[in-house]
Amino acid sequence: MTAAIFSHDSRSSAAIGAAAHNRSKALRKILTYAALWIAFVWAVFPFYWMIATSLRAKDEIFQRPPSLVPHTVTIQNYIDLLVGAQFWRFAMNSLLLTASVTLVSVLISVTAGYAMARHRFKGSVVLPLFMLYGQMFPPVLLLIPFYAQLRLLGWLDSLWGLIPVYLSYMLPLCVWLMRGFFSQVPHSLEDAARMDGCTRWQAFWKVILPMAKPGIVAVATWVMIHSWNEFLYASTFILSEKNRTLPLGLSGLIGQYTTDWGVLMAGGVITALPILLVFFFLQKHLVSGVGGGAVKG
Amino acid sequence: MSARTARPSGLKPTWSSIFETGLGARAYPYLMVLPAVVIVLGVVVYPVLSGIMTAFYDVTLRSLNSGDMDFVGLRNFERVFADPNFVRALQNTVVWVVLNVVAQLGLGLALALLLHRAMPGIGFFRSGILVPWVVPSVVAVLTWRWMYDPSVGIVNELLVKLGVIDAYHPWLGDTATSLYAVTVESIWKGTPFVMLLLLAALQLVPKSILEAASMDGASGWKKLWYVILPQIRVSFAIAAVLTFILTVNNFNAIWLMTEGGPLNSSEILFTLAYKYGFKRFDLGLASAVATMLFVGLVVATTVYLKLIQAREED
């Protein structure tokens, strides 16, 4: 009812104001671009500010008032950061941890996701939902049991101890996403391979896996990014300085009284860099993969 | 059938043929899901159950070492409710969640509508607007902390230049503003993901519907309200629930900017539980708060799953 009234209204006004139409269209375009620019600046500015701070000389960082554009550009902060052995140690720890967690979760979620998408068995309907629930558990509820367990096993303050902890919040969603990707691979392909005499395993390994590669890449990237960035568990379970990951190392640069923001921001840029690179190379996979998986299920 | 017996010579029977018939064929899917199920049982289900149990025991570091814990029934919950910090944290959590969810969904929808059109340079804007989502959370939070700096922070300088404030303000150090200052960071960080979800939903809206609405002369707002929103309502609800879950679980922003302070002014239930657990080492008390959060999140997750199912039935 209401729609009919609106349509009648605007149609008559459109006929009258045909000349005004073009002008309002141009105005709308200008407004759209203005809004886009505002959003863009708002989104990018903190990132710009991090880079700008990392390139400033120490005395300029604490100059008041701060200037939007650095007067002089120096890489001194990066040198200060990178000559210390610590930073490399943190980076190696992060790399090792991220690689292990990614490898384990991809290997395990590939087979599970495939089986859930393709086979009917007891639990093939319930299990995926169970996985999704597993993802939603609040980390704070898991923290304390993990702490007690790791203590018991003597894995507190160990990078290896973090692997099962990270799996707890990676694996369920990985399985869920993988199941989504595998259900998009057409059945007929597998049937054809089986007709040609492949065993189930061969059909899975040689035909289905290559088809599902974009999904696997997306899931692997998702795990990589999240393990690389993880802070809560690492900061609770890692006690000694030599076992810190990059995010921990960064937060450790915050001093009680003074903080060397130049070096800290340089560290931030270097920590963010691998993620940004991964993201912009794989943007297409990621956006459709994670976004689609979460929405479509 | 005959195709299988007439095996092409290139493919030899391998170890994997044991999955072709009989018991092997029936066990095959179970074997494939087994590792995932075992790990999830071990690292999710068992810890969750043991965490909930801890809420009913008196657990401190000492009792953790000796192994004997006393069952105290609901005492931990009573102690939590009696703590004025808990009441404060509960209020803050409500403010924190409402502000985050409303702002992220509103801005996310606006951005999705802006970016959902073929305009020159739209890819550039889209990439730029996704930056907050991509920057690692710890890096983003520390950058904002630096931007909020009370003496040389750029936020202060810009606000003074724009005439919003007269003098520099310690945004994170003032009990009146700390929670809101952290909220701004969290909105900045979370909105792009909401935008992505809604953009994906918008792209699924059939063009013909939008065109029909335009032909009928529906103006922008009416088209949004009567045509677009009903089409994406399920995705919108899903985004709302996800944002809710992510906000309740957002520890980094608060912890790395204010640690819940000053004077508990930015304490949320998550950081309160963390403090109970790992500053006071009263693990029973921490578990009681965590269990309450857990119940809230389970309800939200259930709603989320119902929404996903509703969407699939659409």
Image (spheres, rainbow, N blue to C red):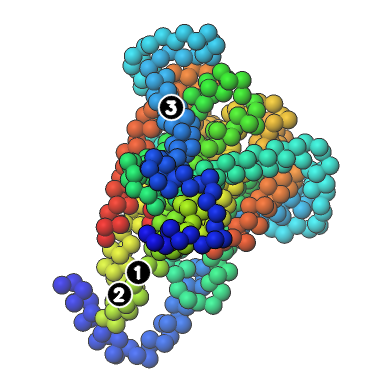
Q: Which mark is residue B46?
A: 3
- In percent of the image, x 21 and y 74: which residue is there? A3
Q: Chain of mark 3?
A: B
Amino acid type of the residue tagged 2 in the rendering: Ile
Give neighbour class at mark 1: few <14, some 14-19, many 20+ (Cα, 10 Å): some
Amino acid type of the residue tagged 1 in the rendering: Val
Above or below, B120 relative to A177: below
Q: Which mark is residue B209?
A: 2
Q: Quadrant of residue A277?
A: bottom right
Residue tagged by mark 1?
B205
- In percent of the image, x 29 and y 82: which residue is there? B215
Residue B162: x and y in percent read 57, 58
Indicate which label's residue lies in the foreground, 3 or 1.
3
Q: Is residue B72 left or right of residue A81?
A: left
Q: CA distance from mark 3 to mark 2?
A: 49 Å
Q: CA distance from mark 3 to mark 1?
A: 42 Å
- In percent of the image, x 52 and y 32: which residue is there? B260
- In percent of the image, x 39 and y 52: which residue is there? A118
* SS under mark 1: loop
Q: Pick the quarter of the image with the C terminus of chain B.
A: bottom left
Residue B291: x and y in percent read 38, 27
* SS under mark 2: helix
Pointers 1 and 2 in contact (CB under 8 A)? yes
Above or below, B278 relative to B270: above
Q: Nearer the viewer, residue A14 or B247?
A: B247
Residue B298: x and y in percent read 34, 37
Please, which residue is most extreme toward the left here? A1
Above or below, B74 relative to A25: above
Give neighbour class at mark 3: few <14, some 14-19, many 20+ (Cα, 10 Å): some
